């Protein structure tokens, strides 16, 4: 597998079985509002996930991600709004009738039941040989055939997660919900499990929503990101759309990295603008800023859009190098501008090049097409 490809692209749809794209139904939530004892948790949340798609609800702790999962699964009835699965309005439908499978963060396996019994739990309608055959099929799907008679405590974290997924899939849901599915796994195992999970998802064509606070994980796994902040959707779209065209400063800094520099608009015309940075330096944009002269703004710039010069260069701003660490093919620099504003820069590292010592002065320019401006809060 090419390690640089997002996982979802590394597994081609051709690898999926012909049975794919049959299980999933489209999900649509519109105008969802929910308050716990008067305290608002989600406020007017709307988004869609197409049948067979993988969406990640992404956001910091407390932003309302789990509440949205509970509302979609039927564990919580929203104060207002509509949840649709395919053509069905399921907003007030009991959880067990929705055909929604849920994998909890801690997997919530029954500790005294074997793997087989855990998976079979969701198959209450089947008995005897028929049930056994169905459980065997599910265990094969998650590649745990050999572990059927073990107890959860005799399994690794990754294996327990697969048992939880098999149990959630047993009643043949049309939508699978996963709450922080990879959070409990160590880093190396996480990538394997994400790959394995996508293989399964593609094979079944099941619509999937996962909740995570880890933007790298969301970008690796999902074809659609829904970024939430303080109970609202900040932006929804494909991972590259959110990375390249974040609509808010929050999205700009939450999906990928960005340094934030305070500035004010010193001049503004139809075709150009001048920004005065908090350091006193000026930068000239070959476009309108979209703000009135005198407005306080912030500039968000991603590390790969900061250009380093060892010597003073036209338009370059001096910065102090605090730290430089190699990271694979890149070298990442932690810099400080003259007024103490931190700035991250990433540059391609020549093979074998030694790392510059901290403490020196460098000069930075920005790839101006990629600098994004937001109103100062
Ligand atoms: P996240 O999953 O993004 O961490 P949650 O949906 O769990 O966020 O929480 C959103 C908000 O609702 C938070 O302020 C949280 O404290 C509150 N909250 C969540 N669950 C409950 C609950 N059962 N009772 C009261 N408040 C809750």
Image (cartoon, rainbow, N blue to C red):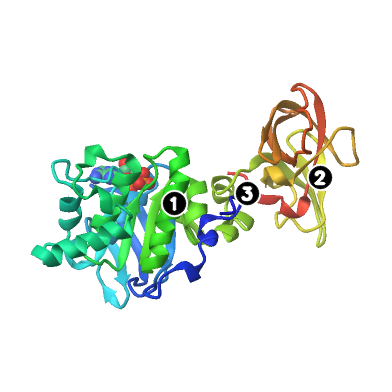
- Give the residue number, with chain letter if any, for mark 2: 283
Mark whose residue sits in front, 2 or 3:
2
Q: Is residue 128 left or right of residue 226?
A: left
Give the quadrant of residue 198: bottom left
Q: Is residue 42 left or right of residue 262?
A: left
Q: Quadrant of the C terminus?
A: top right
Residue at the spot 44% in from the left edge and 51% down from the top edge: 194
Residue 57 image point, x, y percent: 42, 54
Residue 301 image point, x, y percent: 69, 45
- Give the residue number, with chain letter if any, for mark 1: 194
Q: Nearer the viewer, residue 306 or 178?
A: 178
Vertical position of residue 335 compared to residue 33: above or below: above
For label 1, the crowd category at 10 Å Cα-Cα, with few meaning under 14, some 14 to 19 and many 20 or more, is some
Report how far apart the C-alphas of labels 2 and 3 lie in the structure: 17 Å
Vertical position of residue 247 compared to residue 27: above or below: above
Q: Nearer the viewer, residue 333 or 60?
A: 333
First of labels 1, 2 by sequence position: 1
First of labels 2, 3 by sequence position: 2
Q: Nearer the viewer, residue 53 or 30?
A: 53
Mark whose residue sits in front, 1 or 2:
1
Q: Which residue is situated farthest in the front direction here?
A: 146
Q: Residue 375 shows which numbered tag?
A: 3
Residue at the spot 40% in from the left edge and 71% down from the top edge: 17
First of labels 3, 1 by sequence position: 1
């Amino acid at each position: 597998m090419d390690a640089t490809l997002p996982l979802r692209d590394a597994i081609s749809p051709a690898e999926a079985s012909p049975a794919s794209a049959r299980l999933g139904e489209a999900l649509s939530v519109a105008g969802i509002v929910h308050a716990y004892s008067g305290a608002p948790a989600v406020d007017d949340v709307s988004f869609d996930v197409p049948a067979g798609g993988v969406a990640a609800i992404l956001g910091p702790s407390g932003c309302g991600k789990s509440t949205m999962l509970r509302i979609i699964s039927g564990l919580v009835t929203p104060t207002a709004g509509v949840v649709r699965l395919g053509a069905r309005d399921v907003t007030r439908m009991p959880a067990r009738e929705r055909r929604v499978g849920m994998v909890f963060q801690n997997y919530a396996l029954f500790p005294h039941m074997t793997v087989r019994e855990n998976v079979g739990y969701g198959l209450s309608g089947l008995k005897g040989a028929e049930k056994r055959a169905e459980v065997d099929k599910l265990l094969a799907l998650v590649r745990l055939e050999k572990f059927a008679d073990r107890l959860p405590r005799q399994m690794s974290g990754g294996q327990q997660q697969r048992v939880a997924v098999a149990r959630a899939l047993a009643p043949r849901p049309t939508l699978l919900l996963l709450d922080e599915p990879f959070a409990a796994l160590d880093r190396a195992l996480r990538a394997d499990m994400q790959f394995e999970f996508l293989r399964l998802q593609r094979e079944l064509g099941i619509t999937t929503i996962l909740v995570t606070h880890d933007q790298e994980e969301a970008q690796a796994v999902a074809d659609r990101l829904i970024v939430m902040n303080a109970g609202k959707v900040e932006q929804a779209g494909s991972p590259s759309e959110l990375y390249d065209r974040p609509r808010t400063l929050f999205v700009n800094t939450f999906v990928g990295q960005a340094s934030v520099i305070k500035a004010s608009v010193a001049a503004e015309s139809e075709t150009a603008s001048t920004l005065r940075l908090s350091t006193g330096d000026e930068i000239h944009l070959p476009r309108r800023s979209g703000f009135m002269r005198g407005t306080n703004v912030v500039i968000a710039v991603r590390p790969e859009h900061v250009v380093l010069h060892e010597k003073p260069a036209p338009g370059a701003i001096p910065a102090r190098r605090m730290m430089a660490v190699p990271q694979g093919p890149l070298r990442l620099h932690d810099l400080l501008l003259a007024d103490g504003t931190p700035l991250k820069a990433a540059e391609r590292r020549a093979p074998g090049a030694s790392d510059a010592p901290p403490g020196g002065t460098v000069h930075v320019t920005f790839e101006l097409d990629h600098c994004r401006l937001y109103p100062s809060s």
